[in-house]
Image (tube, helix red, strand yellow):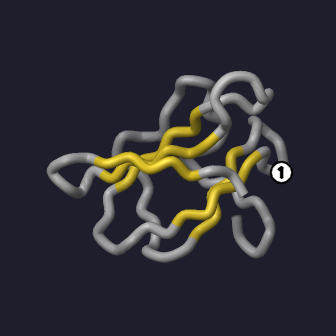
Amino acid sequence: MSGGTFTAVPGLTDLAFGDASASSGLALPAGPIVLGIAAANAPDPVATFSVAPASGQRLFALALGSLAGQGEDFRLVQVDTAPATWSATSVMPG
């Protein structure tokens, strides 16, 4: 998101359930960023997540859980692959 406006990112749009972006990933600047998850062709995200990648971090993210309120809460899990032992952190929406 940029300035409160959801901006689609090429290569990360219209991914169906179970699909993934290119394995090469996407370079993001270090520092705070708000990520949004939206339904295909929807102008607004159903959930947003505030993250702050650090310089040198190598992260990938998974959107997990239920938006319907049944089962696990919807969240983003970011996995840091830079250290020898990978670590995962849950990020709740909002």
Q: Residue at x 61, y 24 (%)?
A: 17
The residue singled out by tag 1 in the image is 44
The residue furthest right is: 43
Q: Foreground: 67 or 6?
A: 67
Quarter of the image that includes the N terminus: bottom right
What residue is drawn where x is 55% and y is 74%?
32
Q: Position of residue 84 (x, y in %)?
A: 15, 51
Q: Residue at x 38, y 54 (%)?
A: 59
Between 5 and 10, the residue placed more toward the observer is 5
Is 63 situated left or right of 44 in this image?
Answer: left
Q: Image quadrant for the C terminus?
A: bottom right
Q: Residue at x 74, y 43 (%)?
A: 38
| Displayed quadrant of residue 6 | bottom right
- Drawn side of residue 3 relative to residue 63, left or right: right
Q: Can you tell which quarter of the image residue 4 is in?
A: bottom right
Tally the marks. 1
Instruction: From this view, report whether residue 15 is shown above or below residue 54.
Output: above
Left/right of residue 45 with respect to residue 81 in the rendered view? right
Q: Is residue 18 above or below residue 51?
A: above
Looking at this rendering, what residue extends furthest in the left direction? 84
Q: Secondary structure at mark 1?
A: loop
In the image, residue 87 lies at what x, y percent?
A: 31, 48
Instruction: Measuring from the top left, give residue 25's x and y in whole percent.
Output: 40, 49
Question: Which residue type does callout 1 highlight?
Answer: Asp
How dense is the environment of label 1, judged by Cα within 10 Å: few (below 14), some, or many (20 and up)?
some
The image shows residue 18, relative to residue 77, as above or below, that is above
Residue 14 location (% of width, % of height): 66, 36
